């Protein structure tokens, strides 16, 4: 079945159980990831449980053609629902054939299958198999317009008892340009800049044009790049020194964490988009000169499972910042060391 874009959020956040295969695809890779995560949370108790969720990539499917079928056929050890998540860079004839076989009952499936992919044409074998299947659902993800992005921002602001100054609305829309994940990252940076509701004692606050200008200041971005570039490029000493300088200059460690998460998402968008100049633009990365060269060098170090591991490191650090009593400075510093060491190993 083919979903209309406007119905995707509702259908994926509240799946009715009649579908065993979900294809979530489109040019907005941040939205693809977000909707796949939302669906996963609705389908299994713990989407991070390796016994409940099997994750495969393009490389896994190409290296072992039977890997996906084996993952789908595996029985649950606990009796709870199982999920198989596959992240593809584009169309895949082998996966499309498997979808048809599962839909026709020719290939056994004990798990629900969630496929993430980039933009797919109407003639795509994968898209056609999902749209034509009786037990499969295809959900397109197209870029949000300015109204959607402002609506997303205001929803997140309200959750922290923040409001948006009317004069700041027009300034905020271009500030959020990019895919859904990048927009959400920028919104979270604004929220952190103003302080969480709990940090403000529940008091209401308003986001102004000056707040947006402060967050997007060139100096702040340059200081952040001095940390992110060596951290994700494999220069352990430079990353550690730049982080120490940033803290001394008043840089928020949670802001550094968000910066690392955003850069990891940009790498993913760049790779999934084909790794060309157009992919740089879609990722919101520098497109010219030394900054673009630096981005591409670092991106080459973070692919496949290594990129997934980087995202898990960042997620674990974020969870620790929110739940533990340890200082954010130390937790983010440890994350920087782990990432920079992993990148250094990838360079060897």
Image (cartoon, rainbow, N blue to C red):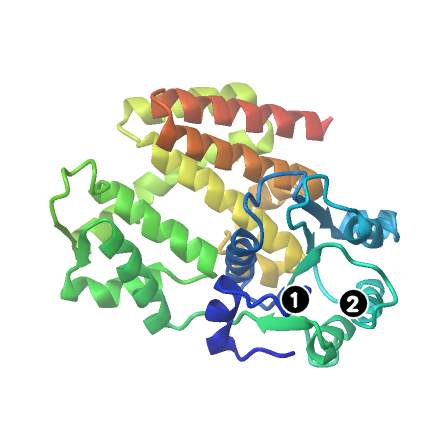
Left or right: residue 62 versus residue 40 is right
How busy is the neighbourhood of tag 2: few (under 14 within 10 Å), some, or many (20 plus)? Answer: many
How busy is the neighbourhood of tag 1: few (under 14 within 10 Å), some, or many (20 plus)? Answer: many
Q: Quadrant of residue 112?
A: bottom right
Q: Position of residue 113 (x, y in %)?
A: 69, 58
Left or right: residue 61 versus residue 252 is right
Q: Quadrant of residue 293?
A: top right
242 relative to 115, above or below: above
Q: Residue at x 15, y 61 (%)?
A: 165
Residue 217 seen in this snapshot: no
Q: Separation of disc 1 and disc 2 at Cα?
A: 10 Å
Left or right: residue 39 versus residue 103 is left
SS at badge 2: helix
Q: Quadrant of the C terminus?
A: top right
Return the residue nearer the eye: 302 or 161. Answer: 161
Q: Position of residue 9 (x, y in %)?
A: 47, 68
Sequence-wise, the earlier of marks 1 and 2 is: 1
Q: Residue at x 35, y 25 (%)?
A: 328
Q: Position of residue 138 (x, y in %)?
A: 63, 72
How many numbered tags mark residues here?
Answer: 2
Q: Residue at x 54, y 46 (%)?
A: 45
Asked if the residue at tag 2 contacts the one at tag 1, i.e. Cβ–Cβ closer than 8 Å, the answer is yes
Where does label 2 land, which residue? 99
Left or right: residue 269 versus residue 153 is right
Where does label 1 land, which residue? 23
SS at badge 1: strand
Q: Residue at x 54, y 53 (%)?
A: 37
Residue 108 seen in this snapshot: yes
Q: Position of residue 226 (x, y in %)?
A: 44, 33
Q: Quadrant of the N terminus?
A: bottom right
102 relative to 295, above or below: below
């Amino acid at each position: 079945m083919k979903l209309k874009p406007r119905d995707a959020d509702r259908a994926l956040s509240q799946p009715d159980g009649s579908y065993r295969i979900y294809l979530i695809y489109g040019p907005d890779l941040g939205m693809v990831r977000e909707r796949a995560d939302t669906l996963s949370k609705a389908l299994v108790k713990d989407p991070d449980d390796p016994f409940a969720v099997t994750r495969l990539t393009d490389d896994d499917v190409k290296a072992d053609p039977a890997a996906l079928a084996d993952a789908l056929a595996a029985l649950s050890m606990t009796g709870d629902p199982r999920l198989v998540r596959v992240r593809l860079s584009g169309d895949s004839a082998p996966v499309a054939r498997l979808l048809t076989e599962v839909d026709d009952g020719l290939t056994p499936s004990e798990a629900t299958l969630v496929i993430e992919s980039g933009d797919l044409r109407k003639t795509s074998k994968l898209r056609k198999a999902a749209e034509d299947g009786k037990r499969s659902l295809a959900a397109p993800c197209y870029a949000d317009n300015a109204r959607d992005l402002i609506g997303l921002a205001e929803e997140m602001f309200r959750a922290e008892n923040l409001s948006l100054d009317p004069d700041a609305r027009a300034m905020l829309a271009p500030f959020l340009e990019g895919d859904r994940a990048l927009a959400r990252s920028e919104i979270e940076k604004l929220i952190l800049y103003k302080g969480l509701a709990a940090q403000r004692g529940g008091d209401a606050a308003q986001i102004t044009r000056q707040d947006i200008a402060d967050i997007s200041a060139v100096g702040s971005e340059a200081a952040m790049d001095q940390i992110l570039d060596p951290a994700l490029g494999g220069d352990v000493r430079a990353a550690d020194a730049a982080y120490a300088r940033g803290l001394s200059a008043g840089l928020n460690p949670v802001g550094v964490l968000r910066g690392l998460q955003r850069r990891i998402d940009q790498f993913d968008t760049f790779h999934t988009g084909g790794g060309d100049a157009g992919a740089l633009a879609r990722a919101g990365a520098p497109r010219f000169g030394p900054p673009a060269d630096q981005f591409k060098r670092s991106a080459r170090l973070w692919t496949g499972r290594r990129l997934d591991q980087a995202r898990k490191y960042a997620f674990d650090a974020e969870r620790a910042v929110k739940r533990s009593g340890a200082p954010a400075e130390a937790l983010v510093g440890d994350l920087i060391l782990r990432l920079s060491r992993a990148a250094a190993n990838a360079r060897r």
